[in-house]
Amino acid sequence: MRGPLAGGVFFVSAGDDDAELHRLVDDIGRRAFDARLGQERRPEQFDAKLWHTLEESGLTRLTTTPDLGAGAAEMAVVLRGLARHAAAVPIAETDLLAAWLAKEADVAVPDSGPLTVALADAVIDGPRLVGVAPYVPWTRAAAAVLLAAETDDGLYVGLLEDVHIDDGSNLAGEPRDRVSVDVTLGSLRRLDGFVGEELRRRGAVARCVQILGALDAAAELSVAHTRERAQFGRPLSQFQAVQHALAAMAGEIERARAATTLAVAAAVDHGFAAQQTDYAAAVAKVVVGRAVGPVTRIAHQLHGAIGTTAEHSLWLATTRAQTWSTEFGCKAEYARRLGRMALEAASGEQALWDLVIGNRLGR
């Protein structure tokens, strides 16, 4: 068994517990990608046909539909698989974030259609809550926008009506809008601040999984290109310098895969609220964030000028990986968090080593 994040340039064995789900997601993602070839991608348009297919397959609310019995491992398969094919749908935002948060706050959201979360820094001004949510994903495609406003008094959650949006996009052209918030406190539910921390942790793990899918796509494209492209009478892949570059790329990706697998496994075993998952998510964010730069650089070097064009599939993978690495916290923020954990553990003779290997974090 290779686990939910196996694959990339490697074959997924038939003995994989998630092999059937891997194949289903890969088939759906590949068909959607092929159908959109040649279409304008900036700004990125919501793929309504793909969403309909995913909804019919039961993949849009996978972890928040109790009857399905799915969890973080299954969601990782879906997120990585769709990211490999640059799917233009908010699966992570709908299931892992918005639908989960709505249940936590007992807020009713539509049973179908995409959802998104407006994570805002806000202040309480008398009977109202005022703030701004920057870089909200897929706002214009969402059937409902769920506000998650962080204040000194806790996390306030509720559906946003008559949303005021300033259109925007990220490096990859995906919608990232600025949402202004000015609502009555009575329309919101107040939750403890740790729910907001878990929300960010869920988002961080989701983005790590998606980045891994994008990096796998970059590696696959690079391997295929160097095999097909000939120079001086032989394929590029036969040159030693190219082989070394591909090996370096593979090393970065497999390091990122190991760290992300740790985060997903912690979420499966302990839940997203656990201290073990907090540690594993921080490790993953740092390791994956550090892998994005070298993999992007090597992939574009191997492709040459063609890989820098917006029409090329490599551009879809690398720009997504770069922009996703900054969402729900950048690698520097999580590196500082790991540093604080190490300083706290340094007072104990065994505690620092336990932290390094991820042992007894819940104590």
Image (cartoon, grey):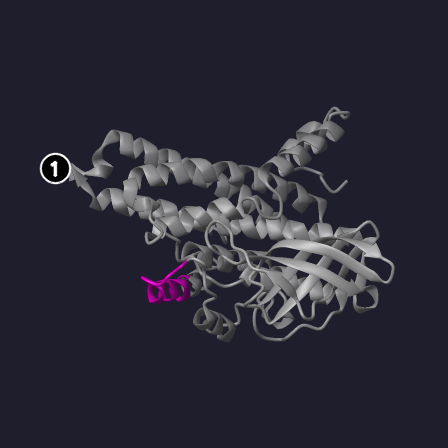
Percent coordinates x, y for residue 223 in the rendering: 30, 44
Residue at image x 28%, y 34%? 242
Q: Which residues are magenta?
A: 26-41
Q: Give residue 141's quadrant in the image.
A: bottom right
Percent coordinates x, y for residue 305 in the rendering: 29, 42
Residue at image x 35%, y 53%? 313
Residue position marked by numbered label 1 in the rendering: 233
Residue 340 in sight from this viewpoint: yes
From what the image shows, is residue 5 above or below residue 254? below
Seen from the viewer's position, the closer of residues 131 and 238 is 131
Seen from the viewer's position, the closer of residues 308 and 288 is 308
Percent coordinates x, y for residue 255 in the rendering: 48, 38
For the residue marked with disc 1, what is the amino acid? Gly
In this rendering, position of residue 313 left or right of residue 255: left
In this rendering, position of residue 305 left or right of residue 321: left
- Label 1 crowd bin: few (<14), some (14–19), many (20+), radius 10 Å: few
Residue at image x 28%, y 40%? 304
In this rendering, position of residue 321 left or right of residue 363: left
Residue 39 is one of the magenta-drawn residues: yes
Residue 114 is one of the magenta-drawn residues: no
Secondary structure under tag 1 reads loop
Percent coordinates x, y for residue 81 in the rendering: 45, 57
From what the image shows, is residue 252 above or below residue 324? above
Residue at image x 35%, y 35%? 247
Seen from the viewer's position, the closer of residues 128 and 302 is 128
- Magenta span: predominant SS is helix
